[in-house]
Image (tube, helix red, strand yellow):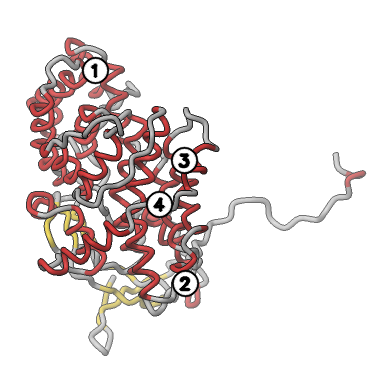
Amino acid sequence: MSDQANNNEKTFTLTNDETGESCKLPIKTGTHGPSVIDIRKLYAETGHFTFDPSFTATGSCKSRLTFIDGEEGILLHRGYSIEDLAGKSTFLEVAHALLYGDLPNKAEKEDFEKDIRYHTMVNEQVHYFFRGFRRDAHPMSIMCGVVAALSAFYHDSLDIWEPEQRELSAHRLIAKIPTLAAMTYKYSIGQPFMYPRNDLSFSENFLYMCFGVPAEPYVMSPVLADAMDKIFILHADHEQNASTSTVRLAGSSQANPFACVAAGIACLWGPSHGGANQAVLEMLAEIGTKDRIPEFLARAKDKEDPFRLMGFGHRVYKNMDPRAGVLKKAAHDVLEDLGVKDDPLLEMAMELERIALEDPYFVERKLFPNVDFYSGIILKAMGFPTSMFTVLFAVARTVGWISQWKEMMEEPSIKIGRPRQLYTGEPSRPYVPLAKRK
């Protein structure tokens, strides 16, 4: 039940059915979304903690960055709709908005892009790190190591209490992680590293570093560069997901930002988080041919069958994933630009999309293709192996991670994160000497 305090602050009254004792907890309201019950004094007043496995009903922080309404299919960054950002802005404009609160004006845009370009190269000694990894190492294992190692090179920006150093670290991470990601890809295929080019846009430069070679000029496709930019924008931030929460929790211990982002990369590596678009391609490979699509759709409808249709529906969005509509067009544009007509996997993906969108079972349940379905198709068409998909996710999400970290560090009441638990182990018991143990 709720009531009204004398100072007009809304409260929630919690009553113990056994003892009749009650306590009033403040209700906090944000700009959008559900209000929250402030339980910070709950233990002191009642002797109880709350129990919320996976923290799905717990607001862990205040944030001004991203808002999601899963029921309506809405995603906002700093109040701007994701459809507007992906359709009208560049990735670095979105990065500026996440970091500083607003889309940049012309002068701010030029200054910010210049700052990022200035930091795209990595220390030459970083090259030696790669030689210590096996060529067949998973790219994410390499990224975890080399991103954390950046803190060994940039001692001038590790004071997390200095705003100028926080900003310098943010710029370095946004600029250097694409370079490290491209180096990771080149290392896996035995090609020489390509140094960044400051005459290219953020996404153009990334494609150049991944697919260019020293022996000949790289021909840039505007369609592919635009699709890459859209993928980066659509994955830039997504509220308090597992990897973002990991970055915030690591940051609450006062760890340096390079270590915090490396922790986020490690969390993103999990297939339940960053591997969804890779799972789409693996599912398509399992289906095998277009004529088997009806068989697998029937299996997806069978509750007794463990098969899941990957890339359809979303844990957060109970309606259309607002990012999917943007990438749907981009996927078709990329396939047309590349002239992809004889790739069975991509042909099958398009056929699966068509059939599922016409199937009443999926339409009624709002199991629409999500962002992972289309991003997997685009990245496969571009030539990225599935093992690189999560790395590309990390390139985009670095902007969100460092913006969330920066926001947290600017909070005056920052404290180390310390979740509690419901202990279910053995009660206190006497110690038994080794000779007497049975």
Where does the image place residue 274, in percent across and percent down from the top left?
34, 41
The x, y position of residue 217, in whole percent, is 21, 34
The residue depicted at 9 percent of the width and 24 percent of the height is 354
* Numbered disc in front, either 3 or 1: 3
The residue to which callout 1 is attached is: 296
Residue bearing the label numbered 3: 142
Q: Earlier in the sequence, mark 2 or mark 4?
A: 4
> Which residue does the numbered mark 4 point to in the structure image?
122
Q: Earlier in the sequence, mark 1 or mark 2?
A: 2
Instruction: Check the image and report above or below for 103 versus 54.
Output: below
Q: Quadrant of residue 401?
A: bottom left
Which quadrant is the C terminus positioned in?
Answer: top right
Pointers 2 and 4 in contact (C-beta within 8 Å): no
Q: Amino acid at mark 3?
A: Ile
In space, the residues marked 1 and 2 are separated at their CA atoms by: 54 Å
Residue that mark 2 sits on? 159
For the residue labelled by badge 4, is the local secondary structure a helix, a strand or a loop? Answer: loop
- Whichever of labels 3 and 2 marks the residue nearer the N terminus, that label is 3
In the image, what residue type sits under mark 1? Answer: Phe
Residue 366 percent across, percent down from the top left: 14, 37
Is residue 172 shown to the viewer in this render? yes
